[in-house]
Amino acid sequence: MGSYTYTIDASHDDSYFNGGLSVCYNTAAYLTVSSYTEGYPLYGALRFVNVLLAQGVKVLSAYLRLRAATDGGSVPVRIRGILQANPGAWENPNCNPDSRPVTTAFVDWSTGVLTAGAWYNTADLSAVLQEALDQGTRVSGDAVAFMLAATGGVAADFSTYDLGDHSSAPQLIISAMPRVMGFMM
């Protein structure tokens, strides 16, 4: 069994997208997730590069670790994987995570009341990550990506790679083990 931690390490690997204005914020210090801002949703997008897991591995647990950028109320968030073998960075014209294919698996997570500077772990994403890893063309070292969409509540702001010294960048924490000859070890 192995444990893996991946941290966002570039501006264009975490962003948020304003669905009404079609504007990508991929160098902002905050990643905002909201179901309704000025009439349009704000989608969060995270991409972790060089993920050294592929087909043949069983994900035992996985979660995102996010640092609140501002104080805020509880926000219900739906997290889906991006269903691409090696998803590209969040850059125009491909910055909208809602325009990319997503996993059928998802997880609903309630942030709880947010306190600026505190770290929060999402609900378990193992089924979401497993579906993304099991794509036929994916290989070890490819990126994996997630879309965060609020399903109600107020806006939630999380720190990004671009905040200060990068120590507040989102993380993906995974526990996994190999499958041997079609069976779990």
Image (cartoon, rainbow, N blue to C red):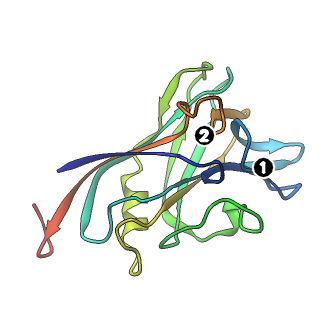
Residue at the disc numbered 1? 41
Q: Is residue 72 above or below residue 24?
A: above
Amino acid type, label 2? Tyr
Secondary-structure class at tag 1:
strand
Q: Residues within 10 Å of mark 1 (few under 14, many from 20)?
A: many
Disc sitting over residue 11 in the figure: none
Q: Amino acid at mark 1?
A: Pro
Q: Is residue 45 visible?
A: no
Element type at mark 2: loop
The reply, left or right, for residue 178 in relation to residue 158 is left
**Which quarter of the rendered picture does the C terminus lie within?**
bottom left
Which residue carries the number 2 mark?
Answer: 161
Q: Is residue 116 left or right of residue 24?
A: left
127 shown above or below 142: above
Q: Residue furthest bottom?
A: 136
Q: Position of residue 67 (x, y in %)?
A: 55, 30
In the displayed structure image, the side of residue 53 where residue 119 appears, left or right: right
Q: Earlier in the sequence, mark 1 or mark 2?
A: 1
Camera-side residue of 102 and 140: 140
Q: In the image, 66: left or right of 137?
A: right
- Residue drawn 60% across the image and 23% down it: 114
Can residue 25 be seen here? yes
Which residue occupies the foreground of this view, 119 or 123? 119
In the image, residue 116 above or below residue 184: above
Mark 2, Cα crowd under 10 Å, few <14 / some 14-19 / many 20+, is: many
| 71 w.r.t. 43: above or below | above
Question: In the image, residue 142 lies at what x, y percent?
Answer: 43, 67
User: Which residue is outermost to the front?
Assistant: 165
